[in-house]
């Protein structure tokens, strides 16, 4: 699941030193407390808390990272190390709909290059970029564990499998029409 070398999730040149900690509503704080209460060791809640911060702030920004380090009692660098390992954690702003196209062997053999080309052509961007209106990002990611239904991509938390270029067009239209989940539930 490592994607630390993809354009969308680069390893920071140096861990930013945040000037402020993110703040959240009482409801979100309560949600965070519920997750923390599940684990005897606070740092074990790192992934669920990362998802919450990402959901609330759009991506893992430096104040969000500082908040996590503070709540979990770890170093900022520890947070970045985990954040840059996982495809599903964004360390840069992404569009409302994040098209994560699997570029690993099965998907590549079964048509990933055509899928990527079609998505990029339709959106006028390259992998690792976001459309000017902020609606779409495209990333190439490592195997998402759905090799038997290659080629595939993930949008939000949903897999879209056995893709054809026509289905790529249809998915983009469904996103534009608000008919697909972007993972913010
Ligand atoms: S190779 Fe694409 S999901 Fe495994």
Image (cartoon, rainbow, N blue to C red):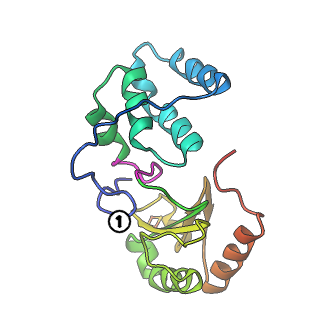
Looking at this view, is 135 or 167 the one in front? Answer: 135
Looking at this view, is 84 or 95 the one in front? Answer: 95
Looking at this view, is 104 or 17 the one in front? Answer: 17
Give the residue at mark 1. 7
Looking at this view, is 78 or 85 the one in front? Answer: 78
Using the image, determine if residue 144 lies above or below residue 44: below
The crowding category of the residue bearing disc 1, from other C-alpha atoms within 10 Å (few below 14, some 14 to 19, many at least 20), is: some
Q: Position of residue 40 (x, y in %)?
A: 43, 12
Q: Position of residue 52 (x, y in %)?
A: 56, 36
Residue 71 horizontal side relative to residue 56, left or right: left
Q: Quadrant of the C terminus?
A: top right
Please report the residue visible at 43 percent of the width from the left and 74 percent of the height from the top: 127
Residue 183 in magenta stretch? no
Report the magenta residues as a range.
Answer: 84-91
Q: Quadrant of ligand 1?
A: bottom left
Please report the residue visible at 40 percent of the width from the left and 31 percent of the height from the top: 20
Please report the residue visible at 45 percent of the width from the left and 71 percent of the height from the top: 129
Q: Position of residue 39 (x, y in %)?
A: 47, 17
Using the image, determine if residue 61 lies above or below residue 43: below
Quarter-of-image position of residue 113: bottom left
Q: Position of residue 18 (x, y in %)?
A: 34, 36
Q: Secondary structure at mark 1?
A: loop
Using the image, determine if residue 123 lies above or below residue 158: below
Using the image, determine if residue 142 lies above or below residue 127: above
Residue 136 horizontal side relative to residue 109, left or right: right
């Amino acid at each position: 699941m490592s994607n630390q070398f993809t354009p969308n999730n680069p390893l920071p040149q140096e861990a930013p030193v945040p000037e402020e900690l993110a703040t959240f509503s009482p409801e979100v704080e309560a949600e965070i407390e519920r997750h923390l209460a599940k684990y005897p060791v606070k740092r074990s809640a790192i992934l669920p808390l990362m998802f919450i911060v990402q959901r609330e702030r759009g991506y893992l920004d430096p104040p969000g990272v500082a908040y996590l380090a503070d709540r979990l009692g770890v170093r900022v660098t520890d947070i970045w190390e985990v954040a840059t390992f996982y495809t599903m954690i964004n360390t840069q702003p992404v569009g409302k709909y994040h098209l994560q196209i699997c570029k690993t062997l099965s998907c590549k053999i079964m048509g990933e290059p055509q899928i990527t080309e079609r998505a990029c052509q339709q959106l006028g961007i390259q992998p690792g970029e976001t459309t000017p209106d902020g609606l779409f990002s495209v990333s190439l990611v490592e195997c998402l564990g759905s090799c038997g239904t290659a080629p595939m991509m993930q949008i939000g938390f949903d897999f879209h499998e056995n893709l054809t270029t026509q289905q790529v067009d249809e998915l983009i239209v469904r996103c534009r029409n608000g008919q697909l989940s972007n993972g913010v539930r």
